[in-house]
Amino acid sequence: MNKSAQRFNQIADNFLNSEVHKASPSIDQLKMLLGEVHDKAICDVACGSGHLGLALAPHSLTSVDPSESMLANVEKLAATKGKSVKTVCAYAEDLPFDSEQFDIVVTRLAAHHFTDIALAIKEMKRVTKKGGTIAIIDLEGYEDKQVDQFNHELELLHDETHIKSYSYQEWLNLFTHEDLTVVEGFSDLSEKPGGISIKRWCEIASSGWEAEREIRAKLEQAPAHFLKTMGIEKREDDFYIPVRTAMFLLTK
């Protein structure tokens, strides 16, 4: 079990109850884009507490995550919704499924933790049926290198297992390398319109007081155009971040 999986075993309940993970405009938008999925086999990769997969799949859902505590919460959440789910403990880079097994493969707010993003995309492509759909929603980096580095520093303080927020163009390059067709692509989305406070953001990730204090100090000292580019606002006694994401619908 890698460091990220170990960490998420400890904070799984935070994600089960997180307002950012339970619902967002991107989940609603993805449901609209996918349309009727009644008879589709869906795989939710790096599923966390399972909010995305359970929001999409009426029947055939397989939820995959390397954290056993996350998978236990997926089963609890499925039970409250009267749904059945197959849970599998595995990494995105090594999916234990036959090739072309699923109609739809999805992942949300997880890819920035993948140790080998190219291999994870290759694996998601492999297990998707020819003509099937892969949907990815994840944190979006910045084309401006200085802003991107600043964002990376904040993300590492927030969660030390963060690896990289890919820019929109970096995502496109990854998909081109795997010969995936981008059916829809969206940039600069917000998982929490109006923003989430640094206090709450750090509570969800159990970042710790020192990290939370350092994040605020960095934001206080940041150039104004950094905050404007990132959509971060200061209101009353805290900063609010939009949880900026990109979303892609792909086909093979």
Image (tube, grey):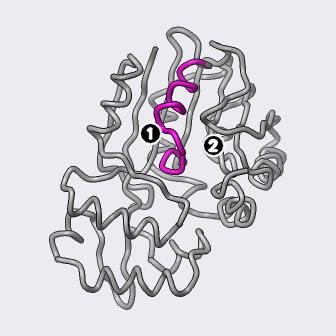
Name which residue lies at 42% across and 84% down.
214
Within 10 Å of the Cα at label 1, are there few (<14), some (14-19), or many (20+) other Cα atoms? few
Magenta: main secondary structure equals: helix
Secondary structure of the residue carrying tag 2 is: loop
**Helix, strand or loop at mark 1:** helix
Quarter holding residue 248: top left
- Return the residue nearer the eye: 172 or 84: 172
Residue range (magenta): 111-126
The amino acid type, in three-letter code, at marker 2 is Ala
In this figure, which residue is indicated by the disc labeled 1?
29
The residue at 57%/22% (across/down) is 36
For badge 1, the amino acid type reads: Gln
Does the magenta segment cover residue 122? yes
In three-dimensional space, the C-alpha distance between marks 2 and 1, rounded to whole angstroms, equals 20 Å
* Percent x, y of residue 246: 37, 44
Q: Residue, x 65% and y 14% (percent of image)?
A: 99
Is 74 magenta? The answer is no
Q: Which mark is residue 200?
A: none
Q: Residue furthest bottom?
A: 237
Specify the label residue 46 is tagged with: 2
Residue at position x 80%, y 50% in the image: 68
Q: Position of residue 103 (x, y in %)?
A: 61, 17
